[in-house]
Image (cartoon, rainbow, N blue to C red):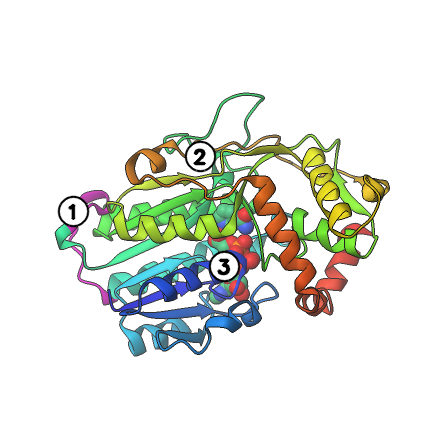
Amino acid sequence: MKNIIITGGAGFIGSHVVREFVKNNPQSMIINLDALTYAGNLENLKDIENEPNYVFEKADITKPEELRKVFEKYNPEAVVHLAAESHVDRSITDPMAFINTNVNGTANLLNLCKEFWTLNPDHTHGRFPDEKRTNLFYHVSTDEVYGSLGETGFFLETTPYDPQSPYSASKAASDHLVRAYGNTYGMPFIVSNCSNNYGPNHFPEKLIPLCISNIINERPLPIYGDGKYTRDWLFVIDHAKAIHQIFNEAKTGETYNIGGFNEWQNIDLVKELIKQMDAKLGKPEGYSEKLITFVKDRPGHDKRYAIDANKLNKDLGWKPSVTFEEGLSKTIDWYLENKEWLENVTSGDYQKYYEKQYN
Ligand code: NAD
């Protein structure tokens, strides 16, 4: 494929996906399409911005005319769609922003692909014989669409959708739209649903980078409720590699769950973070535990997410390349070496948001 648009490429996961595609596809032009909201930061891509197969286009997926200009300029063969409003807490205070970007924005992209690509509705569910695949809409989604688990069990690709927050409901709607365009119009698509990511370039409103930043600055570490919420965590570079592999090797019409086989209760995760950070910062063991502060719970908080990524492992041989302890250590090192990045993003609007949420 010659021209590949990656939406949301200036964000946390998108920046790693762009890097993975730029490095591994020298014959393709990788077009990073991003509106640069508070979460988009081109500093995340400084190391590859001069690569001959990389270009940035500022465009908003909620504005079809802006998208059209990019489509007319590049006539893309494929779209890897990550652009989204992604923070659950923000979706509780401003659900419409999530519906506009995640639902309408995805529909705008699908409509342009439908217009620019030659689709064949006879290929139901977006399934194409592999040799005939010329276009691909790869939709990046979350395990939160499946809702909340009890103490046991895992999300499978066949688990019924049961989203609980405006964020997850908007992502679920976008997943449904992608599959509906596959089924109705013959749009070749792939969807992947991933668990919580962590790693370099993560905006410090999410648990791990927020705690890293606050341990550095000796500020409170806010933990929701009793701290027993359980999430599966995956190192972001492993997610980016999974997306690249699925993009190249999976059959169209497929769905893959991507996860780290790595469940942690929030409180235990924060204690592991404190252990590693106190050691790296030369502080006595357990020094930063005094910063742990339990805060009022998020409304409708999902208790446990756990993903079964065995289909991806069985079909394509993918598995995470690092353990959680290794990935966390790499992540902490990155934040300690990039304090300027952290200072830049924790100023301005982010700071105001932070004050509102936690003070
Ligand atoms: P992020 O918030 O860090 O980045 C989102 C990017 O999208 C930003 O660069 C932002 O500028 C851009 N964007 C937002 N609105 C836009 C618009 N209207 N037009 C164009 N660009 C716009 O998000 P992330 O954590 O990197 O997540 C990326 C994708 O992966 C999302 O679709 C999210 O639902 C999904 N996902 C995230 C996680 C996670 O743990 N972070 C897990 C699974 C799936």
Compared with residue 162, is residue 202 higher up or lower down, i.e. above or below? below
Q: Determine contact: label 3, label 2, CB under 8 Å.
A: no
Picture quadrant where residue 216 is located: bottom right
The residue stretch that appears in magenta: 116-130
Q: Is residue 251 left or right of residue 308?
A: left
Residue 172 percent location from the top left of the image: 45, 43
For mark 3, give the secondary structure: helix
Amino acid found under the numbered disc labelled 3: Thr
The tag earlier along the polypeptide, 2 or 1, is 1
The tag earlier along the polypeptide, 3 or 2, is 3
Crowd class of label 1 (few under 14; some 14 to 19; many from 20; radius 10 Å): some
The tag earlier along the polypeptide, 3 or 1, is 3
* Residue under the image location 77 percent in, 44 percent down: 222
Residue 290 percent location from the top left of the image: 86, 41
Q: Pick whichever, 132 or 15, lies toward us.
A: 15
- What residue sits right under mark 1 in the picture? 123
Q: CA distance from mark 3 to mark 2?
A: 20 Å
Residue 235 in the magenta stretch? The answer is: no
Q: Determine contact: label 3, label 1, CB under 8 Å.
A: no
Q: Dominant secondary structure of the magenta stretch?
A: loop
**Which label is found at residue 161?**
2
- What residue sits right under mark 3 in the picture? 101
Amino acid found under the numbered disc labelled 2: Tyr
For mark 1, give the secondary structure: loop
Q: CA distance from mark 2 to mark 1?
A: 24 Å
Q: Is residue 64 left or right of residue 144?
A: left
